[in-house]
Image (tube, coloured by chain):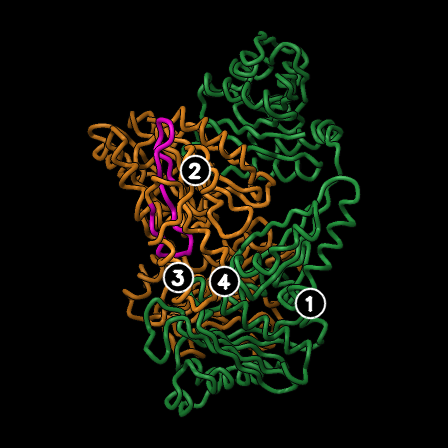
Chain colours: A orange, B green
Amino acid sequence: MTAAILSIGTEITRGEIVNTNATWLADRLTQVGMEVAEVVSVDDDCPRIIETLRRLAATHDVIVSTGGLGPTTDDLTALCAARAAQVSLVRDPASVEEIRDRFRIFRRRMGPSNIKQADIPSGAVVMTNAVGTAPGFWMCLGRAKVFFFPGVPREMVHLWEKHAQAVIGSYAKEPTAQIRLHTFGEGESAVAERLADVETLFSGVIVGYRASFPVIEVKLLARGAGAQALVEAAADFVRGRLGSLIYGQGEQSFVSVVAQAVRNSGLRLALAESCTGGLMAQLLTSEPASDYLAGGLVTYANDAKVKLLGVPESLLEEHGAVSEPVAKAMAIGAARAMGAALAVATTGIAGPTGGTEDKPVGLVYYAVAYPGGVQVRHQVFFGDRSRVQRIAAFSALQLLRTCIASPTGC
Amino acid sequence: MTAAILSIGTEITRGEIVNTNATWLADRLTQVGMEVAEVVSVDDDCPRIIETLRRLAATHDVIVSTGGLGPTTDDLTALCAARAAQVSLVRDPASVEEIRDRFRIFRRRMGPSNIKQADIPSGAVVMTNAVGTAPGFWMCLGRAKVFFFPGVPREMVHLWEKHAQAVIGSYAKEPTAQIRLHTFGEGESAVAERLADVETLFSGVIVGYRASFPVIEVKLLARGAGAQALVEAAADFVRGRLGSLIYGQGEQSFVSVVAQAVRNSGLRLALAESCTGGLMAQLLTSEPASDYLAGGLVTYANDAKVKLLGVPESLLEEHGAVSEPVAKAMAIGAARAMGAALAVATTGIAGPTGGTEDKPVGLVYYAVAYPGGVQVRHQVFFGDRSRVQRIAAFSALQLLRTCIASPTGC
């Protein structure tokens, strides 16, 4: 049983967007036990889309296609699918109603081009889309079942989870087991080197890595009878090897793990951000946080550090804003200003300018104030501005987690 | 003249890595005037690689392949290229010496598997690799010239720039012209409907859209003689049609346009964020901002609004945190707290919980304090938490831009 992925859109063949949809689908298809043999992207060209659909449908058992289901004139996928199967396009009345409802809920005007999204190849099965206007559909073509998803990532994810995953998974012959462990603190090659012997020690386990800066996911996969026991044994081994580098597993995100640690402490949290510029606050508030987050101060300018956090001007003059004493004073000041028992502060040089010989671009001090005291660390992070900001925010929140876990000294 | 990109490697078809190489190559090929029609990834399977090479070489003029040139047993690309062309593999003596030298420079031990990297299809032209051990090569196959690069990104970039770019660029016949206009304020289908007649009015212009929530990019592309004048005329028309929806063009980002407007005003800016949770600060500080940004307050909890922004408790009690008076008081309080003449504030219900009949999830008040007064707007935004936060932050910053542009009343 082999599968192919087809991404449709000139924005991909022109290199305007990175095709993360294909990577996501390849990962999911592999997880449900399909062997993905080919990943193809074609431009918005009807003959090429038709030819590619027919070629893939002659070779593979499952095809998953994304893109080209939108309302605009360059959205040709449904038309091409119908032509590839030599059937007509038919307007699906239920989908027309769905689209109408969706526009009513969104309180937006529905144009005639939106109705076009209800046209699907005759005989295809509609996959309703609760998070967007374009329904998906699936149909038989050649020897393959072909699934058509919109290219908007969250709509694709929704249709995969709601409609396609179970259908496709039922074709895969062998059971598959996978465990995902999430690490923070080392790069992909360093993690991979530490685990170089796992595939030898646990024969049948495939070790994969996925980097989503600055975290690295370790994936352990096995197929066939006994797959679950095998990956569990390998996961125990990896946990022992990587120790505190691992912060979570499965669906746990770094932010959710930090939030849970703060919630468990029963303490309220304040943030003081200089070089991270609000990123820590943005990360934490990407999930509801009002039960533990008092607030945050983005004290980008020195006078804001003085006025809002009460950092003494003398400290700034003597040590500079990027220094251990100022990081400490920021954390203590944030806790006091917001009446919180926990506080995290960052101050550093995110770049691209502002570095000196003593204090290079990438130097970041981060501090945590907690009932047991104040802890400060500093590191020189490498990479561009956004990478320095991101790894600094993660490092500071990681220190917070450590301090909460061992309040007598982190 | 069409081109195809072929990426070889099971790590791609299993979804373990994102294929950024293909995106980079597609962008470069488009820049030198090639039309990339197809981007294909296949697993490390010799028959499939051979079949794909032959198929692409029968259809396209240029093929660029990456991956599978390494020293391990699953690196099969050179062998498959030779079989596809029905020639033998020959060891290139100059490449053997290059590889030896490189190992000497890197002070690493050269294994027998590394010598294999000097084996190339008979008749192929070697592309020396100054930054890695595997040379690249190019050869004729079918109607195509096929270029083989290693999969390591910096080696691929090196071989493209040193060897392939000029050769491939010389094939492209037609000049290409493109203008990109950036819009905020309406969805993709609404923008597309407004521009439905552009391709008819300006024959030869291709209109494309790229949504990067919440902004929509309009791309105008033409090829051949007169392409530049044609897209410029179309762009003028689109500017007239879309008016203030357009905030920038080309490489301009929404953040850079807002930052420039603040810089031009000569005033300093303060932020007060409730429902956007630091996102406005994070957006603005994604680029250096210390010359105009005083700081930001993430006043997620009510007591932080009182303590840090001086919002009267009576206002919160009477109107609730999500209200016009509180949004106004937050903006005025932020300006005062940070000694800034400009301030932006947001307060709303990002969801997924916390909505009521009167104040549904998605309701956001945003306010701008500026020397001409205070302006407040409110809207109900649709979508999940991250979308509500994102469009609220953009809307508030857009209002700031408008207030700066017409200080007598925005």
Name the residue type under label 4.
Answer: Leu
Q: Which mark is residue A279?
A: 4
Amino acid at the residue labelled 2: Ala
Single out the mark in the foreground, 1 or 4. Answer: 1
The region drawn magenta spans A126-147
Q: Chain of mark 2?
A: A
Q: Residue furthest bottom?
A: B314
Which image quarter holds the C terminus of chain A?
bottom left
Circles 3, 2 touching at the beta carbon (< 8 Å)? no
Query: How far is disc 3 from disc 2 in space, using C-alphas?
Result: 24 Å
Q: Position of residue A322 (x, y in %)?
A: 58, 64
Label 3 crowd bin: few (<14), some (14–19), many (20+), radius 10 Å: some
Residue occupying image coordinates x 56% and y 58%? B193
Q: Residues within 10 Å of mark 4 (few under 14, many from 20)?
A: many
Q: Position of residue B207 (x, y in %)?
A: 63, 50
Disc 1 target residue? B260
One can see residue A30 in this view: yes
Image quadrant where residue A388 sits: bottom right
Q: Earlier along the polypeptide chain: callout 3 or callout 2?
A: 2
Q: Does residue B165 appear to the left or right of A401 in the view shown?
A: right
**In the displayed structure image, the side of residue B107 where residue B226 appears, left or right:** right
Cα distance between the residues tagged 3 and 4: 38 Å
- Residue A237 shows in this picture: no
User: What's the mark number on residue A100?
Assistant: 3
Label annotation for residue A49: none
Identify the residue position indicated by label 2 in the image: A82
